[in-house]
Image: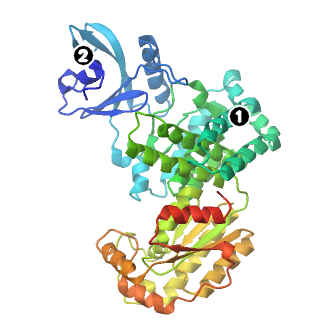
Amino acid sequence: MSNLPEMARALLKPEIYPEPTKNVRLMQTQMSFVFITDRYVYKTKKAVNLGYVDYTTLEKRKFFCHKEVELNKRLSPYTYIGVIPITEKDGVYTFDGDGEIVDYAVKMKILPSDRMLDVLLKENGVTDDMMPRVAAKMADFHSKAETGNVINDFGKIELINHNNEENLSQMAPYIGRTLTQREYEKIAYFVRSFTKENTVLLENRVKEGKIRDCHGDLHTAHICFEDGLIIYDCIEFNDRFRYCDVASEVAFLAMDLDHNGRADLARSFVSSYIEKSGDSDIKKLLNFYKCYRACVRGKVACFKLDDPYVPDEHKKEAHYDAESYFDLACSYTNTTPILFITSGLTGCGKSTVAEELSKRLGLVLLSSDVTRKKLANIPQNEHCYNDIDSGIYSAEFSQKTYDKLFAEAEKALKDGDSVIIDASFIKAADRKSAKKLAEDSGVKFFLIECKLDDETARKRLARRMDESSVSDGRWEVYLAQKQKMEPVEGVPPSLHAIVNSSKTNEEHINNILDMIGYI
């Protein structure tokens, strides 16, 4: 902590806070110091000028602290308490003391980390009612948000084109590092042609009052299911990032849900928002704005790669993030959905590949393990070790599971979404049914066959027995499936990827993306 400014070091002392606290933790962002006490959060702004934000003077930091509280009270009126001056006298720092005012802090209540949407997603804790609740709150917020001539300017074609060209120019230096030339060209062609072909639609959005003073940073880490629903941490430092089409804001959260491998929740959020707002034109704009938002997140991750102050381990994470966001952005440029299916024995890595691919391409992920237990009313992480071919693993129940998977896939494909069905597909008849579903739905079909040597599979399944997992796969199931596995036939090599799960997942994903023409 020795490299911290003097004031920041002082704010790490519990005794200077106005309420008793035993602990003070510090978190930093590029623009802020965040001090977390036992009950409250105090945020100060760093004296930085990053081009799009300027906090270099005391008056500017005071102004933006007050603006942060004012703007965030629109969606979280009881979370933000106010702005408190930080004073200094004879080298001693206090809050609202009688010394010289040297800075300002935004004071807010602590929100429980385990109720944040991004955390709930990781812990499989999102319930069916959550996204409709977010949609209803945002639809109401957007209907009341400020609009007018100045704000409307940000919905004009010229500025939309400027934003897209800015993205492209800032992405270009990273071609060959985090995105391919093919991805770059597909994204560039898509965004440029979309604005040319949809000029009337975009102009009508302005006329209809759809350009609003929005939240500006609506993603899963800024949504908390506490005291009902709290949406916080909007952008205060640059009006340009908040003034946008409400469709762009809806697309931001939908894209983030896609990136978390939950395209199903993205669909729930968007459809609920359209139902509440009556704004059906969002459907026409969704992929365009999703692509834009994914590009923004991708380029921001790229910037960390060249920042000398970012540690190497964080750069590795940023590199993965950038690649995955650009893959996702590219997926939005494809107008024809794809039905992916996995095939292979238990423990061969099907779910790992399916989950990663769903995040990289925004696929609706349908899991046979999850679907089977839902049909049986069994908690997902509760193991059910029936005898082979009995109980929920009987031929009859397995067919019921596949029928449900196909029905859900058909609905998603009709809605224009790409789908991946994560299942063993031991029987050729089930694979043929999936292929026919794709043909009947007018979409592409792609099969991912996962293989693994017996010894590695045995060790992997032994470890799984001790873990909390939705899968009930074990060694005896593997052996039984191996006896019944029917060879994959009748699928052209161009639509059939063979994945040896002893190799890295990154190699396999990139190979699949290359085969389907994404990279």
Q: Residue at x 72, y 61 (%)?
A: 336
Q: Which dot marks residue 160? A: 1
Taking depth in this image into account, of 489 and 21 the one nearest to the observer is 489
Q: Residues within 10 Å of mark 1 (few under 14, many from 20)?
A: some
Assess whether mark 1 and mark 2 are in contact (beta carbons under 8 angstroms): no
Quadrant into which the N terminus falls: top left
Q: What SS does tag 2 mark?
A: strand
The residue located at (56%, 56%) in the rendering is 360
Q: Residue at x 49, y 58 (%)?
A: 128
The residue indicated by pointer 2 is: 94
Image spot of residue 248 (x, y percent): 63, 40
Residue 228 visible here: no
- Measured Cα–Cα span from mark 2 to mark 1: 46 Å
Q: Residues within 10 Å of mark 2 (few under 14, many from 20)?
A: many
- Foreground residue among 213 and 190: 190
| Visible residue check, residue 367 | yes
| Residue farthest bottom in this picture | 483
Location of residue 270 in the rendering, given as x and y in whole percent from the top left corner: 61, 50
Between 3 and 60, which is closer to the camera in this rendering?
3
Element type at mark 1: helix
For badge 2, the amino acid type reads Thr
Of badges 2 and 1, nearer the viewer stands 1
Task: Indicate the quadrant where residue 91 lies.
Answer: top left
Give the image location of residue 16, x and y in percent: 21, 21
Residue 129 position in % (x across, y down): 49, 55
Q: Which image quarter is the C terminus in?
A: bottom right
Looking at the picture, which amino acid does disc 1 mark?
Ile
